[in-house]
Image: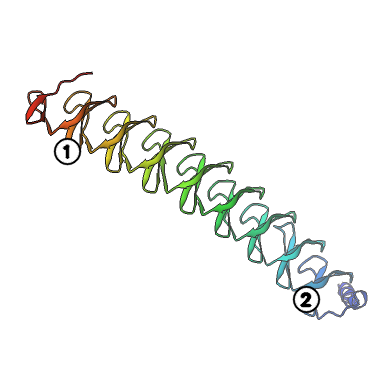
Amino acid sequence: MKKAILTIIILSLSQWVFSQRVYDNIGKFGKYHKDWALVEYQGHYGFLHINGKEIIPPKYTKIYPYNKDINGWALVEQDGLYGYIDNAGREIIKPYYSKILDFNESKKGWAMVEKDGLYGFISDKGAEVVKPKYDKILPYGKIKKDWALVLLNGNYGAIDLMGAEIIKPKYDNIEKFGTLNDDWALVSKNGLYGFIFQSGVEILEPKYDKIYKFNDMHKSWALVSKNGNYGFISIEGIEIVPPKYDKIESFGDYHKSWALITKNGNLGFLTMDGVEIVSPKYDSIDKFNKYIKGWAMVSKNGKYGFLTDNGVEIEEPKYDKIIKKGGVKGYINGHWEKIKKRK
């Protein structure tokens, strides 16, 4: 035992000869590495082998303990920059980054790195998989399982699991996929909204003030608004009805396949195909079948008439008043006139 201790002392002392350097401090052998001791010289650190050979010259500001969970690597710091060395003393990642976060925190096998205030990723193979160029990288899975949102100059984009930039940072916001449509994500730019597909392709450019849920008013359609006017887009991203109406009410309220529309205070009807079957020109439209089956009373400029459920103005608005008493009658030119259904 005494002989072994003497041997270690002799070998430790011999480092002054082999390395031709006088260390300020020599740490305990085996603390960091089985046969190595941490050495210090003029405020920098390296490693000395038990045989007296200098494995790593004192060049690092700090050497952290080896971590078996990261390929047995040790984090090193050099003048405020960080890198990694392996258990053979080789510099796997040169001290280049101002910060290296924990591996496997954002993605298995990767560690987020910071350089000059910008963020990227390195892999546990020592490769820089995402160059530090983003102001922020959000966790994977926030909007899509295999994507991470990235922020650059106030704009959002996305990278995939390989680190490839799927969406260039150009949007004010990217919402989670499936919020309004299963395969789409709502995006906004300059206060306007559009959609991107799961491949990252922009399927609908941001041009609407608001996009409502699909299927709420019409199967496979979504209500959209722009400059206070309303229209419809299809589930394929096609504009079926341009936003030009002040209001669009629910389909079926007045007619089973029509929706009441308002424009400049006037009323008309829109079909489920997106066709304006009755142009907005009436001050009021009553319910169908209230007076005559298949007809709806309409008014314009204080006069009353009738509209059929085919969209035909069967009686122009010319009556001062219409009543249903002993049949349907209209008051015009000072007398009552019977109104009978006709084709």
Q: Does residue 102 appear in this view?
A: no
The answer to which quarter of the image holds residue 34 is bottom right
Q: Position of residue 19 (x, y in %)?
A: 90, 74
Residue at screen point 27% across, 25% down: 312
Q: Residue furthest right?
A: 17
Q: CA distance from mark 1 to mark 2?
A: 94 Å
Q: Specify how the rendered protein is coloured.
A: rainbow
Q: Quadrant of the N terminus?
A: bottom right
Q: Quadrant of residue 37?
A: bottom right
Q: Residue at x 61, y 56 (%)?
A: 105
Tell me where residue 119 appears, x and y as whole percent.
64, 60
Residue at left offset 27%, top offset 36%: 281
In the rendered view, does 263 fall on the left or right side of 337? Answer: right
- Residue 188 drawn at (x, y percent): 49, 50
Q: Is residue 202 above or below residue 320?
A: below
Mark sitting earlier along the chain (1/2): 2
Which amino acid, mark 1? Gly
What residue is disc 1 on? Answer: 302
Q: Amino acid at mark 2?
A: His
Q: Residue farthest to the front?
A: 333
* Residue under the image location 83 percent in, 66 percent down: 35
Q: Residues within 10 Å of mark 1 (few under 14, many from 20)?
A: few
Q: Is residue 219 left or right of residue 78?
A: left
Q: Specify whether 334 is left or right of 79.
A: left
Residue 152 horizontal/vertical position (percent): 59, 58
Where does label 2 land, which residue?
A: 44
Quarter placement of the C terminus: top left
